[in-house]
Amino acid sequence: MDDWTFRADRVTKSFGELRANDEITLQVRPGEVYGLLGPNGAGKTTLVKQIIGLLKPTSGALTLGPHDLVEDPDAARQLCSYLPQAQMPIDSFGAQQVMKLTGMIRGGDTITVQRRSDELIDALDIGEWRNTLGMKLSGGVKRLVGFAMVTVWPGRLVILDEPTNDVDPRRRRLLWEQIRRLGDAGASVLLVTHNVLEAEKSVDRLAIINDGRLIAEGTPSSLKAQDRGRMRLQLMMTPGHDTPEMPPFVHHHTRVGNNVMATVGESDSAQAIGWAQEMMGLGEAEEYALAATTLEDVYIRLTGHRSEEEPANIEAAM
Amino acid sequence: MTGGPMAIHAPSSVRTGWAHWLESYVMMTRWELGSLRLLLPLIVALQVIIGGGFALGIGLLFEDMPARNALYLSTGVTVVTLITVGLVLGPQLVGNRKIAGTYDFMWSLPVPRTTQAAAWTTVNSVIALPGMVAALLIADWRYDLPLHISLSIVPAVLLTIVTATMVGYAFAHAIPRPMITQLITQLLIFFILGFAPINIPPENLPAWLASLNDWLPFYHMAVVIRGGLTDGLITDVGSSYLVLTLYTAASVAVAAWVIGRRD
């Protein structure tokens, strides 16, 4: 039997002076859900577009099993299915109609495509929009229909670029279940996202990309290993105030907008709370929170970004 | 909700060959017609109004239209209606896709890209032909034309539609910004209407412009279509077929190259 592992080997993509991807090497094995995390502009979508043949690498290799995806973009399009981050062209189609049509374009037969689209409609709980025209669907339901379109007859490698965007929390869980099932059924899933918290729960392994380079790779727990026994102290600074000098028990800290995130040892928790209260007393900070570290902290430490990058979102997350 | 494991039919081999091409062409034509389904009646109606309106409009040029002029202008109108669909409407629709952001998904579909170009040409023909027929019927009714329709109208129309559609398609895909494409195609239409010997007899043009048009496809489109619609109006269609066939082949090759290349 063929080994259908997807391999990116030292993939570099330059646009003039800019290196959007810089020697990226990674592998996604069949059955694996692999997260590709990074802030906007990190080079995630550029990598994905090279896999599916929309862009050509400046150097490096992309292979899926025995197929060279760079040399043979026709093979790439047949063996990979791709949910782009952008809108899907479904305005004039009924929801199930467009799933079936895409399934057949992907090479599926009528009976299987009908059965599998029924299955997905049930699993994602979008039955009430089965025959609704795409133009009348909300953004979240459109996204779910898009997911069903690319997985009704999936490729060996399923690439999902921000699949949960605009999807309501309940159906988000259903969607994650289906993504997991794709892996269980033997597909390799490459999941592009900047939602670290969601990814942490759903991916087998992940890579963090920043400024075009792969800066960390591993299972969520292996990436968090460095932060074991540590807590996250989050300090909301009063607008206009500089980052205060960190006390010696802070291991490292990052500031995004007015939000300062510091990592402290569990045994230093009491001291950390005392210090945060002192900052509030001085009017330097408005609020604080102490919590267990998550993958998000690793991500922030490595990229200097929060996964939800807008300052407004940071406030909302407090 | 599904409980058990899904049956997933991931492809193990890569489909190639003519059967795959034809199957993909049929599917993509279904896709294109489906995605224009809501707009199609409107677009076709508009083409019919434009074609018919144009045919009536030329009557205003003369107080009493000479029969030969009526035949010349009416057949010219049919050529213009065919060209404008491929050259203007096609790029506009591609531009809409670029603006809506649906472009990447379309190019990621597992079909040979040439089938997408072929499906596009088919859809353009569906849009263009009713306008052409309407222009002819209305002109015939209004001016009582001595039409003499022969089978050669089929290749003439096909060559004209394919060339115009592929030129528009290549521009629309090669130029990243739809706005620039629109400016270029509008410039082309301006040239076609004002300075190409479609509705203007070549002998009325300055010599240099007439000889330039010998090397461009528009005049030859008019010649072969007139050849298929009339008897005696046109004498030498052979060289026009030759030039136009070369243009068709070149436009298909350029369009295939444009959609096949990767940055």
Image (cartoon, grey):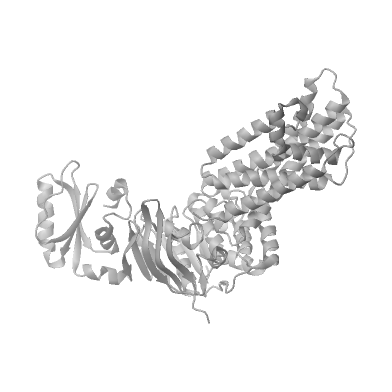
Where is residue B206? Give x, y as percent. Answer: 71, 26
Q: Residue at x 49, y 78 (%)?
A: A3
As drawn, which residue projects farthest toward the bottom? A1
Between residues B121 and A181, which one lies in front from this camera angle?
B121
Quarter of the figure with residue B182: top right
Between residues B43 and A199, which one lies in front from this camera angle?
B43
Quarter of the figure with residue B237: top right
Q: Is residue A122 visible?
A: no
Q: Residue at x 57, y 71 (%)?
A: B11
Between residues B41 and A274, which one lies in front from this camera angle?
B41
Question: Is residue A210 shown left or right of residue B243?
Answer: left
Question: Is residue A167 shown left or right of residue B142?
Answer: left
Where is residue A111? Give x, y as percent. Answer: 66, 69
As drawn, which residue projects farthest toward the top? B63
- A167 w.r.t. A107: above or below: above
Where is residue B184? Give x, y as percent. Answer: 58, 36
Q: Is residue A305 visible?
A: yes
Q: Residue at x 84, y 46 (%)?
A: B152
